[in-house]
Image (cartoon, rainbow, N blue to C red):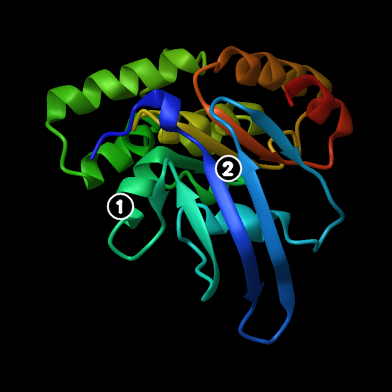
Amino acid sequence: METPQNDLHIEVKHLTFHYPDGQPALRDISLAIAPNEKVALVGANGSGKSTLLLHLNGILRSTTGSITICDLPLTDKTIPQIRAWVGLVFQNPDDQLFSSRVFEDVAFAARYRGLPEPDIRDRVTRALSLVGMQNYADRIPYHLSVGEKKRIALATVLTMDTRILALDEPSAGLDPRARRDLIHLLKSLTTQTTLISTHDMRLAAELS
């Protein structure tokens, strides 16, 4: 199920979500993000930024409101395709990296979808190159710096030709040099629509 690049967008209509304990997280949220647009989502802790990102590929589901990705409504049936289109990168890269080698972490999504091994290797090589980590395939993720882990976490979603990047606090925990390197990296990714949850107003100003 392929969608042309120029049809890519995010549309959220009247989304409301409460956690199981009754705590409200989203209340009547509507937004539309155009193809290749870079948008910063800014708000206080607990305002629902991460919760909104987790709805974009169905990790969290609400019974109120609707989400459309690349003109495809998010439903039980469409979640596999939408998860290939929406690359969610968590604030803490340790939540995304769990293998003994960088290669295996980056290859995980492609393997899960049953792609041929030669295709998987090509995708991993390309994704690591995009994030400047092409020499890290055999490294142990646990031994990497926070900045390096964030790059690897980004590579894990780029293997699937991700069309939408949803980044949760991408600069959190980074020193000034790693933060600057990350900004340059994200600026270089010009073919994706990007939604960034952040407290970093300078990063928001530079990327969105």
User: Residue 175, relative to residue 105: is it above or below?
Assistant: above
Residues marked 2 and 1 touching at CB (< 8 Å): no
Asked if residue 124 lies left or right of residue 134, the reply is left
Q: Residue at x 61, y 38 (%)?
A: 33
Q: Secondary structure at mark 2?
A: helix
Task: Say which residue label 2 marks.
Answer: 93
The picture places residue 164, in percent across and down from the top left corner, at: 50, 35
The picture places residue 117, in percent across and down from the top left corner, at: 14, 29
Task: Say which residue label 1 marks.
Answer: 80
Residue 79 visible (yes or no): yes
Asked if residue 127 lies left or right of residue 190, the reply is left
Quadrant of the frame with the C terminus: top right
State which quadrant residue 2 falls in. top left
User: Within 10 Å of the Cα at label 2, are there few (<14), some (14-19), or many (20+) other Cα atoms?
Assistant: many
User: Within 10 Å of the Cα at label 1, are there few (<14), some (14-19), or many (20+) other Cα atoms?
Assistant: some
User: Residue 30, relative to residue 157: is it above or below?
Assistant: below
Q: Secondary structure at mark 1?
A: helix
**Mark 1 is on which residue type?**
Pro
Tell which residue pokes out farthest to the bottom in this image: 21
The picture places residue 136, in percent across and down from the top left corner, at: 43, 20
Q: Residue at x 64, y 73 (%)?
A: 17
Residue 139 visible (yes or no): no
User: Residue 201, relative to residue 99: is it above or below?
Assistant: above
Looking at the image, which is closer to me, 114 or 163?
Answer: 163
**First of labels 2, 1 by sequence position:** 1
State which quadrant residue 157 falls in. top left
Q: Residue at x 67, y 56 (%)?
A: 30
| Viewer-side label of 2, 1 | 1
Q: Residue at x 68, y 13 (%)?
A: 184
**Mark 2 is on which residue type?**
Pro
Q: How many marks?
A: 2
